[in-house]
Image (spheres, helix red, strand yellow):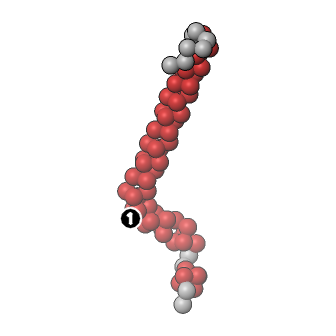
């Protein structure tokens, strides 16, 4: 007997409402921590991109307005 055979005799509301609710109750903490981790990671990536872009902008700005040929 496979999973489709097990769920075949049940009403539709058990398959589409009760089972997902049980899964959210059991795995809700894991799902919430995973979503929180992904949002935190995305925020850190955006901060990193903004800082690198700012450094590139500043280096190009001061390199263009500085004395030519002196380098570092």
Pick the front one: 9 or 33: 33
Which residue lies at the image location 44% right of the left edge and 61% below the top edge?
A: 24
* Quadrant including the N terminus: bottom right
Q: Residues within 10 Å of mark 1 (few under 14, many from 20)?
A: few
Rendered residue at 54%/82% (across/down) = 3
- 27 shown above or below 3: above
* Tally of marks: 1
Residue closest to the eye, 18 or 59? 59
- What residue is shown with label 1? 26
Res. 16 visible in picture? yes
Please state the horizontal and vertical placement of residue 65, each as a whole percent of the image.
Answer: 60, 10
Please name the residue shown 61% across and 12% down the image.
68
- As drawn, is 1 to the left or to the right of 37? right
Image coordinates for residue 38, horizontal then vertical, percent: 47, 48
Q: Is residue 17 above or below residue 44?
A: below
Q: Does residue 58 show up?
A: no
Q: Position of residue 32 (x, y in %)?
A: 41, 52
Vertical comparison of 59 with 52: above or below: above
Residue situated in front as seen by the camera: 41 or 65: 65
Relative horizontal placement of residue 32, taking residue 42 as reference (left or right): left
* In the image, residue 43 above or below residue 23: above
Q: Secondary structure at mark 1?
A: helix
């Amino acid at each position: 007997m496979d999973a489709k055979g097990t769920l075949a005799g049940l009403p539709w509301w058990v398959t589409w409402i009760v089972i997902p609710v049980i899964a959210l109750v059991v795995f809700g903490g894991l799902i919430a921590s995973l979503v929180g981790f992904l949002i935190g990671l995305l925020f850190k990536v955006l901060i990193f991109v903004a800082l690198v872009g700012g450094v590139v902008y500043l280096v190009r700005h001061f390199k263009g307005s500085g004395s030519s040929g002196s380098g570092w």
